[in-house]
């Protein structure tokens, strides 16, 4: 319906033709374009109104397609006597309007075509639409290829790293106290002053300059769970019995307990190992 | 003679048991309150005095069997070594006094600082064989040595700050922290108790029997019991908030580290159990103790120190698995510490002079373990390096006598032997320190002595075979472990001591071989052999005429060798060994060659390993000998100079399979800068079969060869090799991403840049392309994919940058500015500053990069690219930075002082030497000063001022009684600067004339002179002086005790002198005499004894300044006030020393003696008067 608004639309043309033929049949030879347009507009509005209300009636009664009865109701609604319609048809010899000509497809302009279209392959029926312009489905090099050359990447990587480091050190040098290598010239090669920190060994032994995987920081032991050495322990008991062994009798029994927790020793070697340093501190009265 | 009197039987009593209980350990005040109880078994009924060792301790009370209180006296001769000889500044006379002082308190000389007199009412307690308990209550306040409190400033509880303490010491120094018999030869059983804060752990020797809370529940007491007899120097203690890690493989082994380091501890000790297993298997003997503890602590002076059942190690040995270089040092240190458990702790020595045995054996065992761990090449190279170090030291300072206690038996057969031995003795006296006591020997000497012991032990292996040598060890261990189970009454504890004689007897028992000659030749005589080999090929007879000369036998440290010597000839037909008998200084030998020369033929040549290799023989002359080697197995202590043409060296480098031979060839090839040498070296560097150290060495050699070659075709040396090995595939000029999986490549990757940086072009500067190359290495360094840290590699790169620096061409004299730098230098400098700054926020392991940067900056300064300034290094040398960084900065500072330093700068360094909180740093700093002294001897220099002489002298003479090693270090430094005579810069006082003749006589060992030097100048008799400052707390001391001490002091040293110098003179009563003296009567008359009586007051005014310096005792203060001459240092020292004084009346120290250098006659007479 919105399409009717366009003057160029075929419906409008047809309406104009209809109005013109009615005018002819009423004896007009010619008419002004404005008048004709006005009449056409009126007719169009009328049809729209009729159609609208017919549709409403049709939907009101639960249908989707209007019947003649709906149209009649529409007329009634608008207060138009449609009985005169048949008279009108009989009285006036109406010229039969020419049927609508199928509109000519406007020719595509070739100017914007990019590339040559690919013809349809033989297995595709010809009626199916042809391929679009190739640029719409073939990748086109719109920018430079990313560099995958080893040398260049290393170069770039190195430069980037260096830039980051430079910026960082520059920033740090500007925001902290510095030494200068040249007298009176603080800005050439400033060296950040060192700070004392306690304990001094911590940062040195646990460096942060690189992040390593946790497993890299420990040795991979092939035999992860070797049986703990008991030889020395038996030796211990020997020497003890030889010497004065009464003090450490406490330590002997747990020897047997060791085997079960051999397995999880590495995870938690603390629990059951017979080692005096892991024993609980005694209360004073016990001594 | 020696049989009668050794360190283990010289005391009139035996020690059976000792209780050590430290209760009041305060980290805030750095003080300790303690109690010891020695169970002493007198060996005779007449025992009146018990001499013990104690230093720094304030002793409150000595009780006998808890019922009687005993009187005691205390003195420490090290507080003023040159008693009467205060004005001397010559090491010659210091040396004499030093030895005298050491002997005066040497437990092996039956002496000690602390003399306990048994009161007459307690005399009934003394009976031969009846145990007597001597209890001593003592305290330590701010101890300066022996025990170290690590208290870092900071917030938080002591435990959070990682506050800890541990004992340390140079040789036998346990006396610094508790009274004991500080001898290696007096083992006893121990009960140890330590009460510490609740969150602290006390680690000590023996089995931890229990830990008990104190009644207030805020502290706990650790009870240890050590049932295996152990000598006092092997007792130790570490207290701190340690993290505890029980070894997962051996639950008897416990590791301790400081808070937060537990992950590193676990990694570091992963393979420690292997060392245990290795030793037990090798020795076929169980580990002698029931437990073992490793404690990693901070600020320790040596990497490891082994004590009975525990060792104290440097916390900086810890590492994670991404670190490569540290692993070698750490494993070796841990293995050595364990080896010393067997020999050193469990088996102690009979005399200190037997030290070479436990040290040598433990190092030898550790060497065997290292051989298993790191490979045979590494081992052989280690032996070779050690040998070279020993040779170097001996040639500079004199032959090292491993066991000086007994002269070698004169060889009756050969006429030259006595000559050589007397020569050796001569050498021995040539040292500027005395080698007759552990506390007077230069630490460097001891270090080299240990190395030499290892070599001698290895020589023994060659003489008697590995199996038998191990059997000897096994025998010693078995005997000792048998003895260790016995009670003292069994008299078997002596089996736990080893001595040269015992050892050679054991060898004889096991092998049937008499090692006397060997022992005399290598253990009781110092020096090494030096061979010079030349050879000529005689074509007609097809023989090779060898000539082996020992020309240098008169040189210092070198002795003539007589005996068999192995010469190996590599000929075309194989390797042939020839055993030559060396009898004279020149030995000529014609050796018939096995093969005929076949010129220019390629042929398979059989090597000594049995393999056959192709060689290009085109370089050969008509001789069929490819190369010659002398003593290839290093079975002698020798240095060897072989003369052979360069192509022979090249063959040796390319084809000899022995690492030592390759190393020697590389050394020799430095002298032949030819294209053929270049090729041989290049091939070696590229040879993947070759030991990596040889390849690295070849790289450095190639640098020298390239610099010496007149024309060098092609790109800079090694550039191509490096690109081939490490350049990336697509772009060889860009280094690959780091991957250090292959350690050989890793070390080569580290070495080549440094070697290349040493290249110089015709203008004497580093070629610009090398600098570009190095800068590119920095630029493209990418460690992201590496499983190992690249910190050492980066440090090497920085070092390489430093090596490229060459002295600036002196264009303008004025200020050095940025504009005056060359482009290359600017680039280098920019790189160094950037890296150094980056380290501030991203520090690497052990700050290796910072260390390298500092050294590089110093180099830039030194060569005139930067203004020479010490400020940067000073800030890096401050306490609180990592030790390696501090040491690097100090190295730079020391260098600066030498080149541009002012007196003020040198003083700053000396301040550190005297006062730095880190004892290890003080020692290493003096070592740095010795290596790079502020000036050369006898060269006029602005720093060669009397103040410096006085300052060092003051330190060695009295300020360092608590730190033997530092004192001896400073003696080394003094010698380096001034030699053993009086320094030139010190104005010769009128005394100088007087001293000179003495010195010469001294050298002749006249004991009369000794006496004179000890008390030549009668100083003011102190008793004549009214005490002007009565507030002095010990002022009230009666004269009597003072006199007693003086008696003791004056009598003792003299007696010791007689004993040591002329044994026959006083030998009989040498032991009992002091006791008698203590009762207050003069026993003998000595020249000058009564001199003072008349001249005392007069002398006083004439007294030279130095005389008063003795800071020994309380009296000191008095003197200070009386005489304004007191040195400033003295005052400070005195304050420090106050704690040393003992409050009890009787304990008066010797100071009175020292302040009045010839007090004897006076005090004696006054005693009589009284």
Image (cartoon, rainbow, N blue to C red):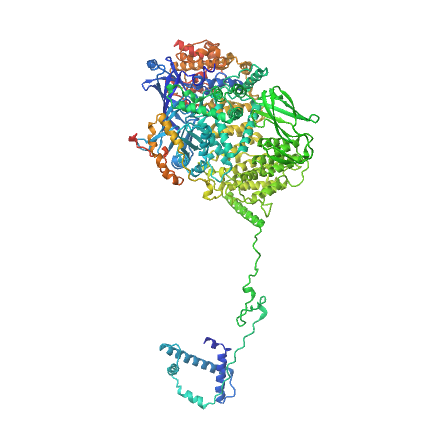
Residue B551: give x, y in percent of width and height: 63, 21
Q: Is any part of residue B628 visible from this angle?
A: yes
Image location of residue B695, percent across then percent down? 58, 36
**Quarter that holds the N terminus of chain A:** bottom left
Q: Position of residue B996 (x, y in %)?
A: 55, 15
- Quadrant of the rendering where the C terminus of chain A is positioned: top left
A184 to B494, vertically: above or below? below
Q: Name above or below for residue B273 compared with residue B397.
A: below
Q: Which residue occupies the foreground of this view, B254 or B536?
A: B536
Task: Identify whether A167 is placed above or below B590.
Answer: below
Question: What residue appears at the point 39 percent right and 12 percent down from the top-left corner?
Answer: B1079
Residue B395, given in percent of the width and then of the height, sits at: 58, 24
Q: Is residue A182 visible?
A: no
The outermost residue toward the right is: B540
- Please name whichever residue, B1030 or B557, is drawn nearer the observer in this view of the structure: B557
* A62 relative to A192 in the view: left or right: left
Image: B1020 above or below B634: above
Q: How many marks?
A: 0
Q: Is residue B538 left or right of residue B639?
A: right
**In front here: B53 or A244?**
A244
In which quadrant of the rendered view does residue B63 lie? top left
The residue sitting at the left extreme is: A285
Using the rendered view, name the quadrant where residue B816 is placed: top right
């Amino acid at each position: 319906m919105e399409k009717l608004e366009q003057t160029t639309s075929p419906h409008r043309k047809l309406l104009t033709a209809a109005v013109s033929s009615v005018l002819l049949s009423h004896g007009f030879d010619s008419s002004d374009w404005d008048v004709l347009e006005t009449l056409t507009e009126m007719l169009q509005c009328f049809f729209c109104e009729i159609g609208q209300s017919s549709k409403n009636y049709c939907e009101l009664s639960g249908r989707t397609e209007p019947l003649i009865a709906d149209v009649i109701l529409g007329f009634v609604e608008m207060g138009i006597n449609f009985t005169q319609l048949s008279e009108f048809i009989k009285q006036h010899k109406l010229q039969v309007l020419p049927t609508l000509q199928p509109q000519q497809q406007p020719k595509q302009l070739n100017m914007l075509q990019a590339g040559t279209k690919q013809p349809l392959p033989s297995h595709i029926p010809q009626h199916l639409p042809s391929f679009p312009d190739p640029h719409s489905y073939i990748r086109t090099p719109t920018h430079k290829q990313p560099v995958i050359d080893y040398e260049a990447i290393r170069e770039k990587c190195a430069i980037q790293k260096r830039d980051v480091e430079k910026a960082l050190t520059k920033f740090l040098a500007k925001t902290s106290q510095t030494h200068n290598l040249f007298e009176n010239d603080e800005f050439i090669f400033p060296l950040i002053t060192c700070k004392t920190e306690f304990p001094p060994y911590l940062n040195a032994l646990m460096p942060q300059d690189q992040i390593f995987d946790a497993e890299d920081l420990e040795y991979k032991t092939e035999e992860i769970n070797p049986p703990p050495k008991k030889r020395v322990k038996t030796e211990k008991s020997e020497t003890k019995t030889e010497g004065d062994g009464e003090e450490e009798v406490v330590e002997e029994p747990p020897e047997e307990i060791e085997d079960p927790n051999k397995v999880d020793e590495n995870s938690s070697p603390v629990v059951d190992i017979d080692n005096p340093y892991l024993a609980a501190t005694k209360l004073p009265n016990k001594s | 003679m020696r049989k009668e009197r050794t360190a283990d039987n010289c005391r009139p009593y035996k020690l059976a048991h000792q209780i050590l209980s430290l209760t009041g350990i305060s980290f805030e005040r750095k003080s300790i309150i303690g109690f010891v109880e020695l169970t002493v078994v007198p060996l005779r009924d007449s025992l009146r005095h018990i001499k013990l060792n104690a230093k720094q301790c304030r002793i409150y009370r000595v009780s006998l069997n808890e019922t009687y209180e005993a009187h005691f006296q205390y003195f420490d001769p090290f507080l003023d070594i040159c008693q009467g000889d205060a004005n001397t500044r010559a090491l010659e006379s210091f040396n004499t006094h030093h030895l005298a002082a050491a002997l005066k308190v040497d437990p092996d000389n039956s002496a000690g600082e602390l003399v306990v007199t048994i009161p007459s009412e307690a005399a009934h307690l003394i009976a031969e064989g009846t145990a007597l308990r001597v209890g001593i209550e003592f305290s330590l306040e701010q101890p300066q040595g022996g025990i170290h409190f690590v208290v870092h400033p900071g917030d938080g509880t002591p435990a959070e700050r990682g506050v800890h303490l541990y004992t340390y010491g140079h040789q036998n120094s346990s006396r610094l922290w508790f009274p004991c018999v500080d001898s290696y030869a007096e083992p006893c059983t121990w009960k140890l108790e330590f009460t510490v804060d609740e969150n602290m752990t006390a680690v000590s020797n023996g089995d931890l029997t229990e830990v008990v809370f104190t009644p207030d529940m805020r502290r706990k007491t650790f009870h240890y019991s050590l049932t295996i007899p152990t000598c006092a120097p092997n007792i130790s203690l570490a207290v701190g908030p340690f993290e505890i890690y029980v070894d997962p493989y051996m639950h008897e082994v416990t590791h301790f580290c400081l808070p937060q380091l537990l992950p590193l501890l676990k990694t570091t000790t992963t393979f420690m159990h292997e060392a245990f297993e290795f030793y037990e298997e090798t020795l076929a003997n169980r580990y002698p103790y029931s437990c073992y503890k490793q404690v990693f602590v901070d600020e320790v002076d040596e990497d490891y120190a082994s004590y009975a059942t525990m060792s104290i190690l440097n916390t900086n040995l810890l590492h994670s698995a991404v670190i490569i270089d540290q692993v070698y040092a750490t494993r070796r240190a841990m293995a050595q510490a364990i080896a010393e458990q067997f020999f050193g702790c469990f088996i102690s020595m009979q005399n200190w002079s037997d030290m070479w045995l436990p040290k040598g054996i433990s190092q030898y065992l550790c060497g065997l373990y290292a051989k298993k761990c790191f490979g045979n090449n590494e081992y052989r190279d280690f032996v070779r390096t050690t040998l070279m170090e020993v040779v170097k030291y001996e040639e500079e300072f004199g032959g090292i006598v491993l066991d000086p206690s007994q002269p070698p038996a004169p060889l009756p057969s050969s006429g030259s032997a006595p000559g050589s031995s007397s020569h050796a003795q001569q050498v021995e006296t040539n040292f500027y320190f005395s080698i007759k006591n552990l506390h007077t020997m230069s630490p460097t000497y001891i270090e080299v002595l240990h190395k030499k012991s290892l070599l001698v032990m290895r020589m023994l292996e060659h003489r008697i075979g590995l199996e038998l040598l191990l059997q000897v060890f096994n025998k010693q261990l078995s005997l000792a472990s048998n003895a260790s189970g016995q009670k003292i009454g069994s008299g078997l504890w002596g089996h736990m001591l080893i001595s040269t004689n015992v050892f050679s007897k054991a060898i004889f028992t096991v092998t049937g071989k008499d090692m006397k000659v060997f022992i005399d030749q290598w253990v009781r005589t110092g020096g090494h052999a030096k061979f010079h080999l030349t050879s000529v090929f005689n074509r007609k007879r097809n023989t090779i005429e060898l000539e082996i000369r020992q020309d240098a036998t008169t040189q210092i440290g070198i002795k003539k060798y007589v005996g068999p010597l192995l010469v190996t000839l590599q000929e075309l037909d194989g390797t042939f060994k020839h055993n030559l008998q060396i009898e004279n200084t020149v030995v000529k030998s014609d050796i018939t060659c096995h093969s005929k020369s076949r010129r220019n033929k390629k042929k398979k040549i059989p090597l000594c390993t049995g393999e056959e290799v192709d060689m290009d023989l085109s370089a050969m002359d008509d001789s069929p000998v490819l190369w010659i080697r002398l003593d290839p197995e290093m079975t002698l202590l020798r240095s060897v100079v072989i003369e052979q043409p360069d192509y022979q060296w090249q063959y040796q480098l390319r084809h000899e399979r022995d690492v030592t031979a390759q190393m020697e060839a590389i050394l020799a090839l430095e002298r032949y800068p030819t294209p053929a040498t270049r090729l041989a070296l290049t091939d070696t560097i590229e040879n993947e079969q070759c030991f990596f150290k040889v390849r690295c060495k070849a790289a450095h050699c190639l640098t020298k060869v390239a610099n010496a070659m007149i024309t060098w075709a092609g790109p800079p040396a090694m550039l191509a090799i490096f690109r081939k090995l490490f350049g990336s595939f697509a772009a060889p000029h860009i280094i690959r991403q780091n991957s250090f999986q292959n350690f050989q490549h890793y070390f080569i990757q580290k070495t080549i840049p440094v070697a290349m940086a040493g290249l110089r072009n015709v203008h004497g500067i580093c070629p610009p392309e090398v600098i570009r190359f190095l800068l590119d290495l920095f630029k493209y360094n990418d460690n992201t994919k590496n499983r190992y840290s690249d910190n050492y590699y980066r440090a090497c790169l920085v070092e390489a940058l430093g090596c490229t620096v060459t002295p600036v061409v002196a264009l303008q004299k004025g200020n050095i500015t940025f504009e005056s730098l060359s482009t290359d230098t600017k680039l280098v400098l920019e790189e160094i500053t950037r890296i150094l700054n980056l380290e501030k926020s991203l520090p690497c392991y052990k700050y290796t990069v910072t260390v390298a940067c500092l050294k590089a900056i110093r180099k830039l300064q030194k060569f005139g690219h930067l203004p020479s300034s010490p400020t940067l290094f000073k800030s890096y040398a401050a306490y609180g930075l990592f030790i390696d960084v501090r040491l690097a900065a100090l190295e730079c500072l020391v260098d600066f002082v030498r080149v541009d330093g002012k007196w003020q700068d040198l003083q700053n360094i000396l301040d550190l030497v005297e006062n730095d909180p880190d004892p290890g740093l003080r020692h290493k700093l003096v070592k740095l000063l010795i290596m790079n002294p502020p000036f050369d001897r006898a060269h006029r220099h602005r720093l060669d001022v009397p103040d410096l002489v006085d300052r060092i002298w003051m330190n060695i003479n009295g300020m360092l009684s608590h730190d033997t090693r530092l004192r001896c270090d400073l003696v080394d430094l003094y010698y380096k600067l001034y030699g053993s005579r009086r320094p030139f810069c010190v104005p010769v006082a009128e005394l100088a004339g007087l001293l000179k003749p003495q010195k010469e006589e001294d050298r002749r060992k006249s004991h009369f002179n000794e006496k004179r030097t000890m008390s030549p100048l009668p100083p003011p008799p102190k008793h004549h002086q009214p005490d002007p400052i009565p507030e002095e707390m010990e002022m009230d001391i009666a004269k009597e005790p003072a006199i007693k001490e003086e008696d003791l002091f004056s009598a003792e040293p003299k007696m010791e002198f007689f004993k040591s110098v002329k044994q026959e003179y006083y030998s009989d009563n040498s032991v009992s005499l002091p006791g008698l003296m203590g009762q207050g009567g003069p026993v003998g008359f000595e020249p000058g004894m009564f001199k003072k009586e008349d001249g005392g007051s007069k002398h006083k005014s004439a007294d030279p300044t130095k005389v008063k310096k003795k800071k020994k005792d309380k009296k000191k203060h008095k003197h200070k006030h009386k005489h304004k001459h007191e040195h400033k240092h003295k005052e400070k020292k005195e304050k420090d020393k106050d704690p040393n004084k003992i409050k009890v009346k009787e304990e008066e120290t010797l100071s009175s003696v020292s302040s009045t250098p010839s007090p004897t006659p006076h005090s004696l007479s006054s005693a009589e008067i009284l």
